[in-house]
Amino acid sequence: MLLIIAIPTAWLTWNILRTETLHCSVCIKYKGKQKCRTATGRDEERCVRTATDNACAFLSSGMTDSLACGRTQPESIQIDTKKQP
């Protein structure tokens, strides 16, 4: 009975701990204001998208403005090439 609980728990813990993440920093300039935010993600696209969304949350107001900001080309993108275990 104990094995029925222990094996899935061990497998889940191992999978969570071995997940690799990428770290990035994105600077967005929108309507004369600039904001830089950092984020993590499983790949470069997700990492940049998350950091962009975070920066746009500070720079925009309302859904239309937020979507327009999210389509803005970042001023700079820095990717930490070392994946963290």
Image: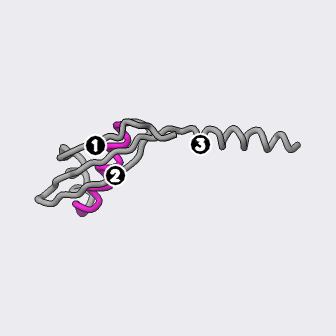
Residue 29 picture location, percent across and down: 16, 53
The tag on residue 3 is: none
The residue singled out by tag 2 in the image is: 38
Q: Which amino acid does label 2 sit on?
A: Thr
Residue 32 picture location, percent across and down: 11, 59
The tag on residue 78 is: 1
Residue ID at (30%, 48%): 25
Tell whether label 1 touches label 2 (CB within 8 Å).
no
Q: How far apart are marks 3 and 1 (CA)?
A: 25 Å
Q: Which of marks 2 and 1 is nearer the N terminus?
A: 2
| Magenta range | 44-61
- Determine the main secondary structure of the stretch shown in magenta: helix
> Which picture quadrant has residue 31?
bottom left
Q: Is residue 39 above or below residue 83?
A: below
Tell me how many marks there are: 3
Residue 9 in the magenta stretch? The answer is no
The tag on residue 16 is: 3
Residue ID at (28%, 43%): 78
